[in-house]
Image (cartoon, helix red, strand yellow):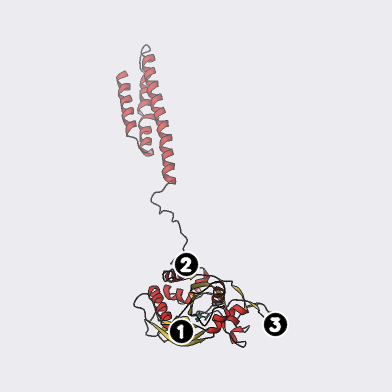
Amino acid sequence: MLEEIKQISLNVKEELTKINTLSELEGFRNKFLVKKGAIQKLFEQLKTVSADKKPIIGKELNSLSKFAEQQYNILKTKLENSKSATQSLDITLPGRHQYCGTYHPVRQVVEDIVAIFKSMGFDVAEGPQIEDSFHNFDALNFQADHPARDMQDTFFVKSNQNDNDILLRTHTSPVQIRVMQAQKPPIRCIMPGRVYRNEAINSRSLAEFHQVEGLYINKNVTFAELKATMIVFAKKMYGEDSKFRFRPSFFPFTEPSAEFDISCYLCKGHGCKICKNTGWLEIAGCGMVHPNVLKAGGIDVEKYMGYAFGFGIERVALLKTGIDDIRYLYENDVRMLKQF
Ligand code: DAH
């Protein structure tokens, strides 16, 4: 019978090396450890063994039974632990995406515009959003009865009986005056910033938006230089094959004045809703700085002259992104913002 015990013991050892899963372990248990299993059968046989051999055989059988039981328990804990480890780590799951913040389209456009003008030698300046009527209107040659001074168009913060009221600036042009007061020519500067107008909100206009102002003051500045600057800028911004045009216009602070248009990005100039069927979109106002404005800024008009321009940034952002309603820019819907 000792032979048989030895054989079963070898079987047990061999089977143990093959076990990799809990179900294989269960197979091992059914084969050796249950009531009708191989080891229990040996215990049955032990009853028939003569009394003198019983102690030796019994000892061998006990140690086999103990060994098989022990190994079973060790493997069971090991396999169960590794099972819970693999369950909590499902490598087939898609990874967790780390969302990275992006610049808002308006911010991106400001950065692009600033970078292009910097490459042409322009500095950057800023001015206050809460302005006085001197810088916002008087110094820019607005007549006392100009409609822009009306409550309908301007948010007034504090009225001083028309003597230098405090208001939210309606454009970035007052920064021109502040730059002229602070610097000596030659001046070559762009001035981005937020502006406010008491306007009804719709797909094309908001009460709070952004502009970039430009100013160049030097000796012998010409309108041709202004045109060249605008065209170089627009080609860099919109691509070499975009089309542009200048139209005569009027602003109190420039003379002569022009409106700068770009061919409509949507219909490629054929006419659509966005461009009101004209094929063109206005993107900037510009002109030669009016002598009264230079004087208000403390510039010697006998020596110096200059050009100025002003872009609406949201308009440029719409053109760049193809968004057709300005309000989308400020709803801050993450699904929209993530696209840029
Ligand atoms: N300030 C003007 C506006 O808000 C835009 C503008 C037009 C600015 C002509 C300029 C300019 O500097 O020369 O509509």
What residue type is disc 1 on? Glu
Mark 1 C-beta closer than 8 Å to ligand 1: no
Q: Secondary structure at mark 2?
A: helix
* Residue 246 picture location, percent across and down: 42, 85
Mark 2 C-beta closer than 8 Å to ligand 1: no
Distance between mark 2 and mark 1 Cα atoms: 31 Å
Distance between mark 3 and mark 2 Cα atoms: 44 Å
Which is nearer the eye, 52 or 154? Answer: 154
Which residue is disc 2 drawn over?
337
Mark 3 C-beta closer than 8 Å to ligand 1: no
Which is nearer the eye, 196 or 203? Answer: 196
What residue type is disc 3 on? Gln
Which residue is disc 1 drawn over?
259
Mark 1 touches mark 3? (CB < 8 Å): no
Which residue is disc 3 drawn over?
161
Q: Residue at x 55, y 81 (%)?
A: 293
Mark 2 touches mark 1? (CB < 8 Å): no
Upstream in the sequence, badge 2 or badge 1? Answer: 1
Q: Is residue 82 above or below residue 61?
A: below
Distance between mark 1 and mark 3 Cα atoms: 34 Å
User: In screen coordinates, is 68 left or right of 172?
Assistant: left
* Residue 100 picture location, percent across and down: 46, 59
Upstream in the sequence, badge 3 or badge 2? Answer: 3
* Residue 66 picture location, percent across and down: 41, 24
* Residue 111 picture location, percent across and down: 46, 68
Q: Secondary structure at mark 3?
A: loop
